[in-house]
């Protein structure tokens, strides 16, 4: 079993839909990252969370430490949101390393 | 623009050739990292540098060497490239010496070894 699991692996939705991507982890963490990778390949950090909730524009990230679960939400989705969304956690045992999820490929159709 | 700059963006090598991937950040970050990304797999840490003057092995260091030239620059060297090193390589940096601060990534280097 992977230490960081994301669901779904693939998600196709219509423009305007509310999107939720989930991340569950099984290790003790000091932080959880949500990152975005566009088809061109570059990786951009969206959020870094250790508790609670963060919002940036149409993106919302939440984390429940007790349940070891995080969600990334996109409101009013747009085709430009199409990308791979990756969850990664910083393990208490090794703060220099991230444990990566496999990513969720999101396609938003116009 | 501030951020992490990697060069080159693309490279094709013959088996046995050597090359150095360059990475520089202008955010005064302490820690820098080299990752590789292979299809169907998450990023894997090759080497990291917690601070200027230090380097440590990550998950997949074999076949690679690194140099933290100064606080800004962290290079990755392949001494004798092998087809198994065909991958996309990413450099990253964090302000503090840990991955519980925001990470910034370069645009990636797509390396093919034939």
Image: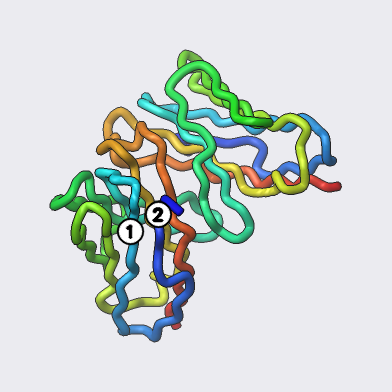
Closer to us: B104 or B56 = B104
Which label sits on residue B24? 1
Which structural element holds mark 1?
A: strand
- The correct choice, above or below, for B37 with respect to A74 in the image is below
Identified at 36% across, 26% down, the residue is A30
Query: Which dot marks residue B4?
Result: 2
Residue A38 percent location from the top left of the image: 61, 53
Mark 2 residue element: strand
* Residue B38 to residue A69: above or below: below
Q: Position of residue A77 (x, y in %)?
A: 76, 37
Q: Residues within 10 Å of mark 1 (few under 14, many from 20)?
A: many
Mark 2 or mark 1, which has the lower sequence index? 2
Q: Quadrant of residue B25?
A: bottom left
Mark 2 chain? B
Q: Chain of mark 1?
A: B
Q: In front: B63, or A33?
A: A33
Residue drawn at the location 34% of the way across and 46% of the way down:
B27
Q: Is residue B5 above or below residue A68?
A: below
Task: Determine the residue located farthest toward the top in the rendered image.
Answer: A66
Left/right placement of residue A5 relative to residue B94 reads right
Q: Position of residue A107 (x, y in %)?
A: 74, 47
Please say if the residues under marks 2 and 1 sit with CB atoms less than 8 Å apart. Answer: yes
Of residue A4 and residue B3, the one placed in the foreground of this image is: B3
């Amino acid at each position: 079993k992977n230490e960081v699991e994301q669901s779904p692996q693939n998600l196709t939705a219509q423009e305007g839909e509310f999107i939720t991507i989930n991340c569950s982890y099984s290790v003790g963490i000091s932080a959880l990252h949500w990152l975005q990778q566009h088809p061109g390949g570059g990786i951009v950090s969206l959020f870094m969370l250790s508790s609670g909730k963060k919002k940036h524009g149409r993106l919302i990230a939440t984390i429940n430490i007790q349940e070891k679960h995080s969600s990334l939400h996109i409101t009013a989705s747009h085709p430009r949101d199409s990308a791979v969304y990756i969850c990664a956690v910083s393990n208490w045992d090794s703060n220099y390393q991230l444990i990566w999820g496999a990513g969720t490929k999101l396609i938003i159709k116009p | 623009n501030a951020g992490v700059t990697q060069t080159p963006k693309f490279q094709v090598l013959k088996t046995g050739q050597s090359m150095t991937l360059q990475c520089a950040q202008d955010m005064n970050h302490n820690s820098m990292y080299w990752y590789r990304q292979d299809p169907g797999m998450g990023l894997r840490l090759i080497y990291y540098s917690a601070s200027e003057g230090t380097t440590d092995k990550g998950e997949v260091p074999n076949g690679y060497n690194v140099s933290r030239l100064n606080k800004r620059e962290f290079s990755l060297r392949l001494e004798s490239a092998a087809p198994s090193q065909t991958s996309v390589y990413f450099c990253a940096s964090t302000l503090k010496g840990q991955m519980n601060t925001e990470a910034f990534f370069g645009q990636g280097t797509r390396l093919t070894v034939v």
